[in-house]
Amino acid sequence: TMVSTTSHNYPKTYTSAIRLLPYIIAISILAIAPTSTSSLMPPTLTHRRLAPNSNPATGGTTKKTPTLASQRGINVSSDSSSTKLNTFRGGNEVVKVFNDAPFHQSIQVIAYTNGIGTLISLATGSHVHLDLLGTGAFALAALAAFETTSSRTTRQQLSTAAVSIWSVKLASFLFFRALQLQHDARLTDTLNSASGTCMFWFISFLWGVLCSLPHTLGATSSLAGNHKLSLGIGGVVYAIGLIVESLADFQKWQFKKLHPGKFCNVGLWGVSQHPNFFGNMVLWAGIFIMNFPALIEPAAAAVSTTGVGNKASSWIQQIGGYLWRFRRVGLALLSPWFMWTLFSGQANGTITNAVDLAVQKYGNDPDFVEYTKSVPLIVPKIFSR
């Protein structure tokens, strides 16, 4: 679902580039400046606590008491590897709240997978592998990030499972459909040129990185985040989105088999022109809710590393420190923003020529004309006017 690069679609290409420019800038910043260790940001956020059995006054040992890390739900490991979450300095343990290794591993896997897709497209011109690799990259990246994570909390396990189930489900369905159809008319113009092919796979890479931010940023957090409310609500929202997307794809596939040459307006397609897009956004909202508590940095960690937000700070610094603690939440919100830009652009025809193709095919059908006027593009009419 990318931008055509043929001459008659230049205006659409320019519009798409402008719409996607903020995300290109965002992904560039994310790639250059890691979320916790960067010259553009304060150092890796940590907080210090006494080793469990040490007494700083006597050098002896004391009765083991609950640690600050355990009190705040931070998982620590005794492994001294640099990728683990804790190290010892002078009898004090420095507990790293965020570890960017899973995030970087995820980006690498998505980049490699889409790079392979680019080479196959340039060499063969095939459409069959597009969604298998583009969508399948999510599962590969999620599993790779999980393997890199040293604190495998219940939240991380559920989030990884959620991303993997959706990715495998959708990639399998779209690959099966591609094997049947062999060709996607919406992408003919785009994939007919090398520049169009590279643009397609670049935006596929952009989609993979930005869409998965709620999960990949959650994977960087050693905070357990096992809040029953967030996991419960997130799980329910995810399940609803997965069911809506799956049912929408199934209904349209069955309709096209029984009524070839007609536009689908049955079932979920009767309340939304793109219910599969809506389901996709809902399920990713569920993944965001699952990981939300773990994206908020503990106040003690922020104060210990930045000095902003302590009681002696000015009210401006207090506000700045509070906002700094929520910066990963802000980054994760790039996901729904990007998806809405991409999906709404496809639905209204500003990013792809799908609308033009539909008008050419069904434009003389009065039912289709009425359908496009009365049925919302994405959000079902039960939720919108």
Image (tube, rainbow, N blue to C red):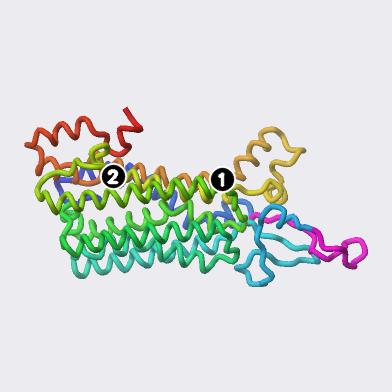
Instruction: Determine crowd level at label 1: few under 14, some 14-19, many 20+ residues with C-alpha closer than 10 A.
Output: few
Label whose residue precedes the other's in the sequence (1 or 2) = 2
* Furthest residue in direction left, as rendered: 364
* Furthest residue in direction right, as rendered: 58
Magenta-span inclusion, residue 59: yes
The amino acid marked with disc number 1 is Leu
For the residue labelled by badge 1, is the local secondary structure a helix, a strand or a loop? helix
Span highlighted in magenta in the image:
45-65
Magenta-span inclusion, residue 176: no
Q: Looking at the figure, which quarter contains the C terminus?
A: top left
Where residue 307 appears, as percent x and y from the top left, is 71, 46
* Furthest residue in direction top, as rendered: 385
Q: Which residue is the site of mark 1?
A: 229
Q: Which residue is the site of mark 2?
A: 16
Disc number placed over residue 237 in the picture, else none? none
Q: Residue at x 65, y 61 (%)?
A: 75
